Amino acid sequence: MASLLLEQQEKLRRVVDDWRLQSRDLLSDLHGSSGSFSSYNATSSSSDPIHLHVELTDDLEDLSSVIESDNAGVSKFLIALSHDCLEISRLSQLANKNLYQQLFLFGHRWGPQEVLLEGEPQKAFGESLSLFVQLYGIVDELTHVLVNLLQQLHAVYSNYDRSTRPTSSFKTINLRTVLESLGEGLSVLILLDEIVRQNGNIRSHISLFARMLSQVKIDVGTFGIALDDLDFLDQVVENLQRLFTHGFFQRLVQADSPFSTRLTLVKSNRKLLDAFSSCFYDGCSETLLRLDSWKELPTDRLKIIYVLALFLFSLHVSGEAPNKKLFKLLEDLLEKLPLIFVGGRKVLLFEILQTKYPPGLSAWLSTVEASKDFNLIQKNFLIRLNELYLRDLEVIRDALSCWAVSFQSSIHPLTEVQNEEWLRLLLKQIMQGVILADRLHVLVVSMLDLHASLEVPLKRERVKSLCHMIVSLKVIGNIFQMRGSSIVQSFPHIMNIIQSDIEGLILPFKVKLQSELAKGTQASKLGLFNSLSRGGRDMDTKLMDSLSLVLVSLQMLGGGGSTKRQLIFSVAQDALQSIGHLDIDFLRIRRLMSKFRIISNFQSIVSESVDCSFLYWRREMAQTWLSMIYGDNSKSTWIQFILDAFSDGLRLLKLCNVDKLTLKSYEQDIENALRNEIITPLCRDIEADLRLHVHSTHLKGSVFINPTKTGVRNLSWFVRMKPLRLPFKFIDVKLLVEVYLNFAFYGHSVMPNYDHKIYSEMRHLGELKYGLELDALHHLERSSCPEFDIGRIFKKLVMYSERYSYIILKQVSSFLHSYFRIFRLLL
């Protein structure tokens, strides 16, 4: 009876404590002002319910209304190429947003060895059918756009049509923007193939689903589904299976492809094939020079995939092995950048080469030394990463500190945004923050993944540094979020500054062209276009085409700077450069446009860089990092940032619609790591600290300790933290410590029974040193409570056992209907 009563009392105590925790949150929600939540946001930008996002848009929807030119040939040329490039960019963004991560996690379960029940794979595929329908639609539309763009490029690079303007004015064709856009579309197909290859659940689940459909067809009436709907669903699944069987990229380049006749035209176009190779060589060479330096841009690693996809496509079309120069460049590429990360998952470039390289040329690929061992490629890259880490760690830390102080102190009121000097400083600081975030992200995700996949243990100092990098990423995101409104107010002026810089490089050329056309003298034309006269072409046509391209470029700079205008401007500049070697610094314009693209899209770039959803695959690091933070009182503010970083994995799981068990298990892992590494040791250490101080005062022979200054550790930093915010709950560390101490003092004999003053001293010390609010429990000093009649109790033991819980070892009798009073009975 006594044990049952004690169990019921313990349950009741836990219920009261749980409601006490929840009531604190409810009261803060009800009585807290709108500014009360800002205290949480001061340490966690991810908890903001509202995010301010700025995006450059255009009121004009039709390209023909955007490009206004009297030169019909130039307008048609720009519209035809720009339309396909814009469609490729749109579909690429859709794939990046809606396909990559979702396909990586399709069929993912919490336990890798978990055995699926009968019908669960079919159910999982059916629930994700909309994802695969979208996949089919994007791939099909993208394939048709790519083929259409190839036809346009074939017409431009063809030797047979030289009467069309402005191609008739070209001296050397250099359409790098269009070629890179073509590579971007091809890279989408290659990356989707790689994701399907890595995730075996996709093919196995769709195969089981197709088998299930064949069984349903046998007895349609039993399942209550219309035959037309079933046929349509079966056709969709059959098309998807055919795509997965052949591969998205292979479907485009294989001999029996529906587009083979159009690709045959490209195969006969030697100039176009050479342009593919030149684009790969130039783009790859330029990017490798910037790689792993402060000049590296956030988009550089993706551009490597773009030009590599273009290179592989050219090999399939031409059927020729690359020359020695391209062979050497490929070896350098595999040495410096053997892998990239897409959607937080690793993609090896050499595996792409092996799976997408033309079968007839595979003998050349086997000569690459690194191809003998994938692990060797990764080990060499890890060694290189460690060298970069040792070289750049202190530089990154110093740069981050300087940037954070400078960026936060340079935000001025709106009345001062017209100051060009200050706007240029703000532009520089935004670029620095974007590059810092991207640099940190690449280092962290690469080192964590390689150490885990190669099973190379991390040294303690390296683990600390990686923790610092994760916190730094979240700090950068937090600073950008807090300063977002001020940046947005200055955003149009910053865009105007970059546009003005580009206009300054083009306007003199416009004036000279108009002057030359007005004069109409051959001598003045030779003075400016001496490089063009050697071609023996119609000079007036060249001048008119050049002027039209200049005017279109200036027109694109004069708008809002949307992605549409940026791309048309770049295509116009490529066409202008193709006319001849003019006195325009095209290299500087290209660099300014790269900066313009980054600034115009800085919020999305920063958001992707500070996104730590990749930590879902390294969730064991949560306990390690939190344990290290607990060992250093000065880093208590890091706890919220670490929790935010691991909480990014929850958003990834929700985005990919994983099952509830997987989601719940990950939530439990995060909470358990916090409780086991922070809250539990904190409670025990504070209890030990209070015991140490009290016993050092009351026990003879002990050394006196100043309770306000001396202790086991200064743990007040952790107790005084604001409630930690997780996506699914608040965790008030101080309240949990109070609940623990109340239970410890209530359930244990933490003081001699004959001296109830000790508890008062411990309670007072907890309030003084840690700011804790402990319950005022009643411990009677001597004999039994006056309310008890011992004789009557022994006469009615049954009634006594129903009302009281008695623990003989602790000599405690607890009245069950008074939850926070303890009566000690000395026998």
Image (cartoon, rainbow, N blue to C red):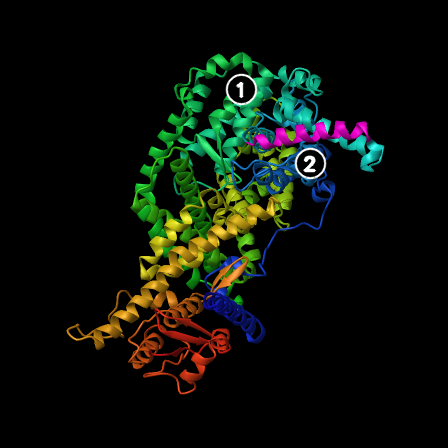
Q: Quadrant of residue 537?
A: top right
User: Foreground mark, 1 or 2?
Assistant: 1
SS state under label 2: helix
Is residue 609 in view from this perspective? yes
- Residue neighbourhood size for the residue with mark 2, other residues' Cα within 10 Å, grouped as few (<14), some (14–19), many (≥20): some
> Pointer 1: what residue?
357
Q: Is residue 659 left or right of residue 690?
A: right
Residue 242, compared with residue 498, is above or below; it is above
Closer to the N terminus: mark 1 or mark 2?
2
What amino acid is at disc 2? Answer: His
Is residue 519 in view from this perspective? no
What amino acid is at disc 1? Answer: Tyr
Identify which residue is drawn at 46% across, 21% down: 326
- Return the residue nearer the eye: 298 or 12: 12
Is the residue under label 2 in contact with that under label 1 (CB below 8 Å)?
no
Q: Is residue 403 left or right of residue 655?
A: left
Distance, label 1 to label 2, CA atoms, is 30 Å
Find residue 476 and report its horizontal and vertical position in percent: 45, 54
> Pointer 2: what residue?
83
Q: Which residues are magenta?
A: 199-219
Identify which residue is drawn at 41% across, 43% down: 444
* Magenta residue check for 623: no
- Return the residue nearer the eye: 574 or 538: 574
